[in-house]
Image (tube, grey):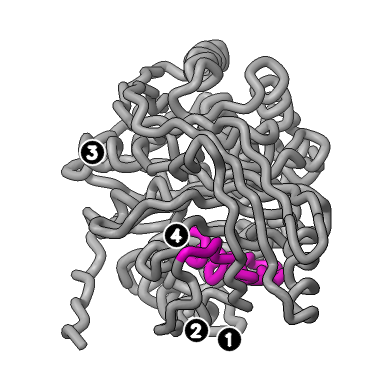
Amino acid sequence: MFKIRRAALAVALCFAGVATGSSAQSFSDADLAVAAKLREAGQSSNLAYELVDSLVTEVGARPAGSENDKKAVDWAVAKLKSLGFPVVRAEAVPLKAWRRGEAHAHITAPFAQPLVMTALGGSVAAPKEGINAEVAYYPDFAALKADTSDKARGRIVFVDQKTERFKDGRGYGPSSTARTQGPAEAGKRGALAFAIRSVGTDHDRLAHTGATRYAEGVPAIPAFAVSVPDADTIARLQRYGKPVKMHLAMQNELGIDAVSHNVIAEIPGTDLADEIITIGGHLDSWDLGQGAIDDGAGVAITAAAAKLILDTGVKPRRTIRVVMFANEENGLDGGRAYSETYKHQKHQLVAESDFGAGNIYRFQTRVRPEALGVAMVIAEQLKPLGVEAGNNEARTGADTGTIQRVANLPILSFSQDGTDYFDYHHTANDTLDKIDPAKLRQNVAVWATAVWLSSQSPVAFHPLPPVEKKPAQ
């Protein structure tokens, strides 16, 4: 116990940014030897790339509730069984699907300009005759929220929120908030439609889709994104001081009754089989591209990592569960269904891969203090793969985040280099050629090593201290 406490102090210092040493004596030599083998095997395994190649080639885009979504579920079940996982099942997830229809938009005045655009997921359709209206321009979402005038009334609101490029993707938050909340803010102000600069860091003339939502009691108005170059055109038109007018036509269907599935594979544990390690990504994708980086890569990385552990022939202490979640993109139905089914089950941790296929550069945790020594050992084992130790304030993905928030579960987090992720995210450019197989191999090695050691940990990562509730402002 003294050694684990000393290691706990070391990791607390390391995660605060002070380099320290650590002890590996909290694990058996046999467990560490398996970890070393997994680390080595992962770097030479092409399985993750083969899986995402198979998914995008044999199925392609797979929006929730579509025929290709059904094909993806069948593909996942068959593939996981063929890989030899002893437990494979598909759990039904009822949902309301959304289907994209024909859409176009163009500037009619002061100078005619075509626009490359796409509907936002969940958007209502425009009237059959379309919408012809003046554009109400806002430089960012904050400007729209601060507007108390009638500027938006009877117009098409355009929010020119730019997405900044960062390695950790933090520029996405403000832009995605504008995308999800913008239609409701525009609707409150009497707008006829809502448009936004694509939530992306590229300069390609491709529009980025993504989910939006409406607020109860607020008129639901058509919502769409225009490509970054076309957003620049709309911004330039403001300098002429003349009304900018737009025509919009957009037909979508929403509220379609459908059923998808969470596809689950398990490696049963031994003495601690009732403690679950849940890892995975989401199986669905948007309809514009192939869904290679979002999130074919994630389901492939986590399945391949679990397969490496399975192939060692050494049974883990805790049950390792791989989940390919349904409908993350347009409703989080898979994450909610998993949470409802398993929220009372004991989880050692949850972890999700849903940030593309870039190299992992940082490892973080959210575990109870008594497990910090174990976290430090895991961090040490990941150093040869170019992964630095982070802190104990990790966050998880949208799917696993649903149950994590409900049950206050421990987290492992692997930060990927997302410098170019939002160049392709939610676009027709989300294709297999954007993936470097060598980077997938590094991901698999990291995941397999960390998941294996977490399964063998002599210390439970749970329970976490209760979440402190902030007083109402």
Q: Nearer the viewer, residue 82 or 92?
A: 92
Q: Which mark is residue 13?
A: 2
- Image quadrant holding the C terminus, namely bottom left
Tell me whether the residue at label 2 lies in contact with that at label 1, contact meaning CB atoms closer than 8 angstroms: yes
Q: Nearer the viewer, residue 472 or 343?
A: 472
Residue at screen point 57% across, 57% down: 414
Which image quarter: residue 37? top right
Q: Which mark is residue 183?
A: 4
Which of discs 1 and 3 lies nearer the camera? The answer is 3
Tell me whether the residue at label 1 lies in contact with that at label 3, contact meaning CB atoms closer than 8 angstroms: no
Mark 4 element type: helix
* Residue 375 visible in rendering: no
Residue range corresponding to the magenta coloring: 154-181
> Tag 4: residue type?
Pro
Q: Which residue is mark 3?
A: 342
Q: Is residue 178 within the magenta segment?
A: yes
Which image quarter: residue 186? bottom left
| Residue 184 location (% of width, % of height) | 39, 62
Q: CA distance from mark 3 to mark 2?
A: 34 Å
Q: CA distance from mark 1 to mark 4?
A: 45 Å
- The number of discs equals 4
